[in-house]
Image (spheres, helix red, strand yellow):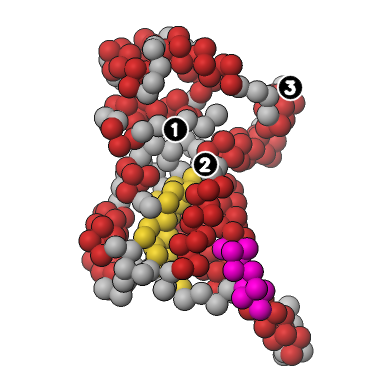
Amino acid sequence: MKFDWNTQHMTTSQQKIAEYVERHLQTVLLSTEQELADTLSLSIASVSRFWRSTGFKNMKDFKKQITQKMLPTPARKIETVLSQSEKEKGLSKSFHTSIQHLEFTAQQFSEENLNKAATLVNQANKVYIYAQGSSVGLQELLSFRLARYGLSLHKMINSGSELLEDMIHINKDDVVILFAFGRKVLPEESVIFSQAKSIGFKVIAVTDQVVSSIADQADITLFGSRGEPWEFHSMIAPTLIVEMLVVAVGSQNKESNLSQLDKLHELRKKYKDLLPR
C-alpha cells in the first residue's frame, strides 16, 4: 500500500507516525489509537490529529478505507507458506525477510520518478555519486554500470571537510546521486543539499526512508527498503533500484548507449587472449 503523504506540512511527530504506518500497516490496522500512541511514545491527541491532517475522519475511517483497498500479493502468499514451518530459521528466514524488503519497495515504487531520474542523469553535464559506509558498494556498482554508457562520472569518496574538495567542481548543469540511508541527515548530506539550493544542480536521493526530510530536499527520491533501524540492513532492494536506474538510463538513449556497448564487445574480442574473461 502506497500513501501520498504531504510531508512538507507534517510535524516531526506526524512524520514519525507516517513512517510507522508505512512499515507496520498490518499492525496499525489491528491497533487502537492508544496502543499506537504508546508504541511511538506520543500522546493520543497527537495520533488523533494525524488522521485528520492526512485526510481521514479518524482512525476508524483510515482502517475502513485501507482495508477496502488491500488485496493479496505474491509476497504475502509466500509468507504464508514459510510461516507454516515450525522451525523457520537460517536461510528460510533470510529468504522471507528479503521478500518483505522487495515487496515493500515495490509498493513504494514510482516508474515516473525512475524515468525522471534517468532523464536527469542523461542530460547532466557530469554525474557525481556520493555514498558512505555500506552504501559504497552501491556507489561502485552504479559507477561501473553507468560508465559503460560513456557518461562523465565522478565518485565522491571524501567525507568531513574534505568533501569540499569535490564540491568546488560541481556546477548547475550537474547531477548528484546521493545514497542517504537512515533517518538522520548527515552533515555531508546537508552540505550537498545546501549547495544544490545555492547553485542549482539536481539531487537524486536513493534512500530507505519513506517519510523524511531527504524526500523534501531531493529533486527525485528512489526508495529501497533495508529493514528497521534495529535489524540487519539488507542491500537487496537498494541494489535492485540501482540496476533499474541503469536500465532506465540506457533505454532513454538507446542508440548511443548500444554503440558504447558494441565498442566494449569489440575490444573484448580483440584482446580476449591477453585479457580473458
Mark 3 to mark 1: distance in Å? Answer: 34 Å
Give the image quarter of residue 191.
bottom left
The residue labelled by disc 1 is: 4
Res 233 seen here: no
Asked whether 229 or 225 is in front, the reply is 225
Q: Is residue 166 above or below residue 8?
A: below
SS category of the residue bearing label 1:
loop
| In-image side of 102 versus 80 (left or right) | left
Please state the extent of the stretch shown in magenta in the rendering: 249-259
Label 1 vs label 2, nearer the camera: 1
The residue labelled by disc 2 is: 225
SS category of the residue bearing label 2:
loop
Say which quadrant the C terminus sits in: bottom right
Question: For the stretch drawn in magenta, what is the main secondary structure?
Answer: helix
Q: Is residue 137 above or below residue 17?
A: below
SS category of the residue bearing label 3:
loop
